[in-house]
Image: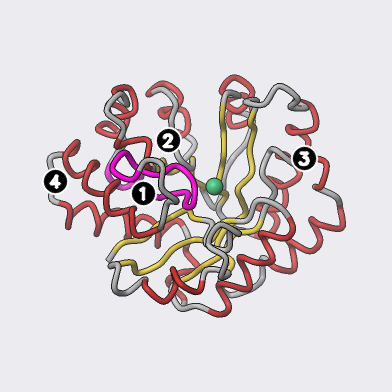
Amino acid sequence: MLIDSHAHITDEQYGDGGAGIAADMKKDGLKALVCVGCDGKSSRDAVAAAEKFDGVYASVGVHPYYPEIVTDELLDEFKTLSRHDKVVAIGEIGLDYHHETYDRDAQIVALVKQYDLAVEVGLPIIFHSREATGDFIEFLRAREFPQSGVMHCYSGSWESAEICLKKGLYISFGGKLTYHNARVLADVASRVPLDRLLIETDAPYLSPAQKLGEINYPKNVALVRDKLAELRGLSAEEIERITAENAERLFFKMKKQ
Ligand code: NI
């Protein structure tokens, strides 16, 4: 059975708080998924979905788009939420310099505060890094990751991936891996050690090549699995088993359910 390590099933594009996706998980071959928070509301919604639905787990965190909302009050709330049985990670947190108006200093402060929280509560971290490689690598190099973490929707170079791997992190591949022009990414995906690989959808975003222009769904993680199987010369079943085992090792609270 598949595990989608990163999705946003309470996104308003689905309109039902994730109920439809959760109801279809078994039929779609999904054993579990992590519903990832991006701000206060989506983190609370993720925990609510995890409470309601079997196989749905949550993470809490603030995306680098919104560093100004990372207040002490919100961090306190995340600390409380992190004790919930089905909150398996802190994230998604990181650096994203894609939009012109980004505030670099504020993003770094918000990232470090949430990293400190993850270390304090003893949970793995879901990282988002886009167009900020230099600063992100500098952040990684200066720190340890006692409960590990994952580079979500990885799209960087092999050199950066190696640094993440040396820090004990996992590398997660999403729909981008299925794009025909994703040669660098395909090379990285063929080199990451098997015990550090995860797969994800980032649904409702980043649909795989076969579903471009459509809203993405966690069930499409099967298309990422198939591409990874092709690149690794393994069967889809083997990749499915390996990535599910890896997800359960990283998100260790999943196993206790
Ligand atoms: Ni995401």
Point out the tag, 3 or 1, that comes first from the N-terminus.
3
SS at mark 4?
loop
Residue 70 as seen in the image, left or right of residue 51: right
In this view, the residue in front, 29 or 248, is 29
Q: Which residue is found at the position 60% from the left and 24% from the top?
A: 132
Foreground label between 3 and 2:
3
Name the residue carrying label 1.
199
Q: Which residue is found at the position 35% from the left and 55% from the top?
A: 246
At label 3, which amino acid type do we have?
Pro
Give coordinates of residue 166: x percent, y percent: 44, 33
Label 2 close to label 4 by CB (< 8 Å): no
> Magenta includes 201?
yes
The magenta stretch is 194-211
Point out the tag, 3 or 4, that comes first from the N-terminus.
3
Point out the tag, 4 or 1, that comes first from the N-terminus.
1
Give coordinates of residue 134: x percent, y percent: 59, 19
At label 2, which amino acid type do we have?
Leu
The image quarter in which residue 245 lies = bottom left
Could you give the CA–CA distance between mark 2 and mark 4, rounded to whole angstroms? 22 Å
Name the residue carrying label 3.
67
Name the residue carrying label 4.
234
Q: Is residue 6 above or below residue 209?
A: below
Name the residue carrying label 2.
165
Label 2 close to label 1 by CB (< 8 Å): no
The image quarter in which residue 185 lies = top left
Point out the tag, 3 or 2, that comes first from the N-terminus.
3
Foreground label between 2 and 4:
4
Could you give the CA–CA distance between mark 3 and mark 4, rounded to whole angstroms? 41 Å
Residue 61 as seen in the image, left or right of residue 239: right
At label 4, which amino acid type do we have?
Leu
